[in-house]
């Protein structure tokens, strides 16, 4: 659960942080949220144009982590952290919202399935996971918070397993089933149990994120029946990070195979494992093996500096959760993207937070990096396709992309390098802070190969615009591609958080001269996938042009010395999805 992230990204004063975590005053709606001051910029943000059209979000109020994701009896389920009372995260209010879908695009909202009403969760029902047991029985493990901020793990069963919508659930009578009785454990930092998997002895395993006196860990537990749990005498994995590991995820992957693996059955030979954790401001991961003799995760490469760990997403993306989709034999992941505006604007518009587009996730053929791509189902929203072939972009060129709704679009571009001789030298220290390098080497800074990419949500005079772009560098033995999503001029409004996000990926340009970019634009949400999903960046933007003018520009551009060709550019307008609509619920 994303407890430590929230105040940090808002970069606000301690007084505002205290308001953000208010737990004392009532707003008259049954929760414990305090009333918020009204921002003078409310007319902009209240506009419905900032609400996404095809991303997952409830009709109103606060949302954060995706939780018990599963496919069950023909239905996809998204359980999620939800405040049913207001558009803020509030201590003691957090419940589990619940929505269902047949296609991962259109969703129906059902009643919350867990609310804080027992001693073991009276101050919040926090993040957890769903597991499908032998025989097809679904169960949920989640973190509950007691009055003294003691975090424990609770169990939940469906009242009627024959109901494909799983509308009602029952808390186990022996909750909590796991308590923080570990030497040196900070009992207020013990949360977010994973989906279960089968261990080397045939017993169930789960991991729970934990902060101990001198290290952080994914603590390992085992059970024969999923009811009674025993801690294994060593963690699944640990590291001396200063920040707690939240929302751990552990799953098997096959190199070069985009099929998913079911962790509740035997894993084939040759499989590797990914251990993901939410730490600091990002979701990071390690690739390695699950050593059956040691009953532990062993990374392929030991990297002490966690700044060098790979990320699931390099932008506004946190607390992701994956699940095995038995319908199509794939692994799907999605995460929480929080608002990047101020708290009072969230209150004014009445909602806060979205989930990213569900992504298929798999391991690259070299076994070193996870790849992600939006699920195919999202393409059902495409309409008004436009295509361009054989474009050539010289230094300073901008090619306007017309014919689609620039606020709701899916854009795919292939950039082909005419030469790689102009690549500038790569400095390995940039890997420690790619965001800083994106600021220093923005789209207006000429380079050898790049910057080239996409300008979106641009006003007529370019006072507002967001840039997603690449630069190509040459290291001693390989080429490194920098991908940036630069929001620094995304809005003339002063309140939004407008960083420059960025990440690097390797590409063998001696064999393949094309670099792909896919960008999904959904009003205030922008998701970009570079190099076939090697780097993914989620951004939240609030341009005034979206609320005031209702039209923006989009361009392919090149500002590097080397000419860049565009052999294929395709773009579509994206129709609205039926996402948790309150009236006329007919999505399914």
Image: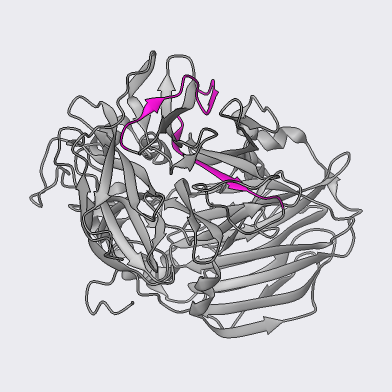
Q: Is residue 558 visible?
A: yes
Report the front residue among 349 and 222: 222
**For this rendering, which residue is in front, 229 or 242?**
229
Residue 560 occupies which quadrant of the picture?
bottom right
**Is 216 positioned to the left or the right of 30 in the image?**
right
Left or right of 521, for residue 268: right
Which x, y percent locates residue 106?
38, 72
User: Which residue does the image show at 44% across and 63% down from the upper left?
Assistant: 543
Colour scheme shown = one colour
- Quadrant of residue 418 within the rendered picture: bottom right
Q: Look at the image and say whether residue 397 sits in the magenta stretch.
A: no
Picture mark count: 0
Q: Which image quadrant: the N terminus? A: top left
Q: Is residue 114 above or below residue 578?
A: above
Rendered position, 446 above or below 222: below
Residue at image location 43% in from the left, 62% down from the top: 524
Q: Is 244 colored magenta in this rendering?
A: yes
The spot of residue 256 in percent (x, y) is 72, 54
What residue lies at 10% left-to-right and 43% top-to-bottom? 26
Q: Is residue 460 visible?
A: no
Left or right for 234, reference 586: right
Compared to 88, does 120 lie above or below?
Answer: above
Which range of residues does the magenta coloring cover?
Answer: 227-255
Quarter occupied by the C terminus: bottom left
């Amino acid at each position: 659960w994303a407890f430590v992230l929230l105040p940090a990204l808002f970069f606000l004063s301690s007084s505002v942080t205290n308001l953000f975590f208010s737990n004392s005053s009532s707003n008259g709606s049954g929760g414990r949220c305090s009333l918020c001051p009204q921002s003078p910029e409310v007319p902009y943000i209240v506009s419905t144009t900032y609400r996404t059209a095809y991303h997952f979000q409830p009709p109103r109020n606060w949302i954060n982590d995706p939780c018990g994701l599963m496919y069950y009896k023909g239905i996809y389920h998204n359980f999620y952290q939800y405040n049913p009372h207001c558009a803020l995260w509030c201590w003691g209010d957090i419940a589990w919202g619940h929505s269902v879908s047949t296609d991962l695009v259109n969703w129906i909202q059902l009643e919350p399935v867990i609310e804080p009403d027992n001693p073991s969760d009276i101050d919040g029902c926090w993040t957890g996971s769903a597991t499908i047991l032998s025989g097809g029985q679904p169960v949920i493990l989640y973190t509950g918070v007691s009055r003294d901020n003691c975090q424990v793990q609770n169990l939940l069963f469906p009242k009627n397993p024959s109901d494909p919508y799983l509308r009602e659930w029952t808390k186990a009578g022996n909750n909590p089933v796991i308590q923080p009785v570990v030497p040196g454990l900070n009992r207020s930092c013990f949360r977010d149990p994973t989906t279960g998997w089968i261990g080397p002895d045939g017993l169930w395993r789960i991991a729970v994120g934990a902060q101990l006196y001198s290290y952080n860990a994914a603590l390992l537990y085992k059970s024969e029946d999923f009811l009674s749990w025993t801690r294994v005498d060593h963690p699944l994995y640990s590291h001396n990070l200063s920040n707690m590991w939240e929302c751990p995820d552990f799953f098997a992957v096959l190199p070069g195979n985009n099929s998913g693996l079911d962790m509740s059955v035997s894993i084939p030979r040759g499989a590797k494992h990914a251990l993901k954790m939410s730490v600091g401001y990002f979701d990071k991961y390690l690739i390695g093996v699950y050593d059956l003799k040691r009953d532990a995760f062993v990374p392929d490469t030991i990297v002490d500096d966690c700044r060098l760990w790979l990320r699931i997403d390099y932008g506004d993306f946190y607390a992701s959760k994956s699940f095995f989709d038995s319908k199509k034999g794939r692994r799907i992941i999605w995460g929480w993207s929080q608002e990047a505006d101020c708290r009072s604007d969230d209150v004014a518009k009445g909602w806060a937070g979205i989930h990213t587009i569900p992504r298929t996730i798999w391991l690259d053929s070299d076994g070193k990096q996870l790849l992600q791509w939006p699920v195919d189902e999202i393409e059902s929203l495409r309409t008004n396709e436009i295509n361009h072939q054989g474009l050539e972009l010289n230094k300073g060129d901008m090619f306007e992309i017309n014919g689609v709704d620039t606020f709701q679009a899916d854009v795919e571009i292939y950039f082909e390098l005419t030469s790689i001789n102009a690549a500038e030298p790569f400095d390995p220290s940039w890997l420690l802070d790619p965001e800083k390098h994106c600021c220093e080497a923005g789209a207006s800074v000429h380079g050898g190969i790049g910057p080239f990419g996409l300008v979106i949500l641009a006003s007529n005079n370019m006072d507002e615009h967001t840039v997603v772009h690449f630069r190509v560098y040459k290291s001693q033995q390989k080429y490194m591609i920098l991908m940036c999503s630069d929001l620094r001029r995304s809005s003339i409004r002063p309140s939004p958080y407008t960083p420059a996000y960025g990440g690097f990926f390797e590409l063998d340009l001696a064999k393949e001269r094309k670099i792909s970019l896919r960008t999904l634009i959904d009003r205030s949400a922008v998701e970009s996938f570079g190099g076939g999903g090697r780097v993914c960046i989620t951004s939240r933007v609030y341009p005034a042009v979206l609320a005031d003018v209702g039209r923006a520009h989009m361009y392919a551009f090149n500002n590097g010395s080397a000419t860049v060709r565009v052999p294929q550019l395709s773009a579509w307008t994206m129709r609205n999805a039926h996402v948790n609509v309150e009236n006329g619920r007919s999505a399914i």
